[in-house]
Image (spheres, helix red, strand yellow):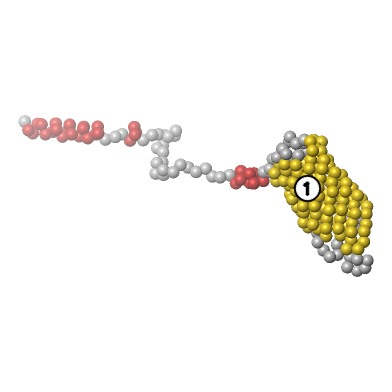
Amino acid sequence: MRQGLLPLLLIALARTTTAAQPSASTNAPATANGAAPDVTSGAAPKVADDPRAHAAQLTTLPAVSDDREGVVVGASFGLGTGVTGDVRLGWMLHPRIAVFATAVGSTSTHDAGSDFRLLGIGARLWIAGPVFLDGRVGHAQATHHDIEAPAMRYTTGVGYLAGLGVELVGLKTFGLELNAEFMKGGESGALVVGLGVTFY
């Protein structure tokens, strides 16, 4: 009787052990191609940064308001072959076109140089976003300082100024700009780089 029960107990124990083991096919989630996913790494895959996106952000020019109108008042200060300052008073013909009356003064930084004055009219045209062209023409007066006699000479005539700039801040009522200007009148001239402010 005992010898007949022993084989039955061994068979029942084997069946119980097999049923208790988990099935790999039911517990492991399958991927789309049937392969089990790699779970050895707990970190999510990292997407590589695109260097072109960073370059585009660095080269993007600041936006300038297209709602400017009315009176324009501005001034700037620059350094170069001379110390230069100017003032402007005018009107916005278009959100990207300004006309104005102007007064420009430049003092030479050299012993043998020229002081320059210009009274006239000018215009500013925004050609691409915050980038603008500046042009002015009028009556120029220059004082020339020479080492040899005569130590000082005066000349008058037509003078002009040509400039290229970019607005660092371009709000509807205010602009902060970086500009480079070349001015010429008779024998006098100056090349300067400076900062300017404009109120609209």
Residue 150 in the image: state x and y as whole percent: 93, 66
Q: At 90% from the left edge and 52% from the top edge, which residue is drawn?
A: 140
> In which image quadrant can residue 153 be found?
bottom right
15 versus 181 height, above or below = above
Residue 142 visible in the current orientation: yes
Quadrant in which the C terminus appears: top right
The image shows residue 36, relative to residue 108, as above or below, that is above
Q: Residue at x 14, y 31 (%)?
A: 8
- Residue at 63 percent across and 44 percent down: it is 57
- Secondary structure at badge 1 equals strand
* Residue 10, percent from left and from top: 15, 34
**Viewer-nearest residue: 41 or 163:** 163
Which residue, as the protein is rendered here, is positioned at the far left?
Answer: 1
* Tag 1: amino acid: Ala
Q: How many marks?
A: 1
Quadrant placement of the N terminus: top left
Q: Residue 78 appears in which quarter of the rendering?
A: bottom right
- Residue drawn at x 84%, y 51% as measured from the top left: 104
In the picture, measured across the screen, residue 163 lies left or right of residue 24, that is right
Please give left or right for residue 108 compared with residue 52 in the image: right
Using the image, determine if residue 32 lies above or below residue 176: above
Q: Which residue is mark 1?
A: 75
Give the quadrant of residue 83. bottom right
Q: Residue reaching furthest bottom?
A: 148
Q: Nearer the viewer, residue 58 or 100?
A: 100
Image spot of residue 90 (x, y percent): 82, 40
> How many residues crowd mark 1 within 10 Å: few (<14), some (14–19), many (20+)?
some
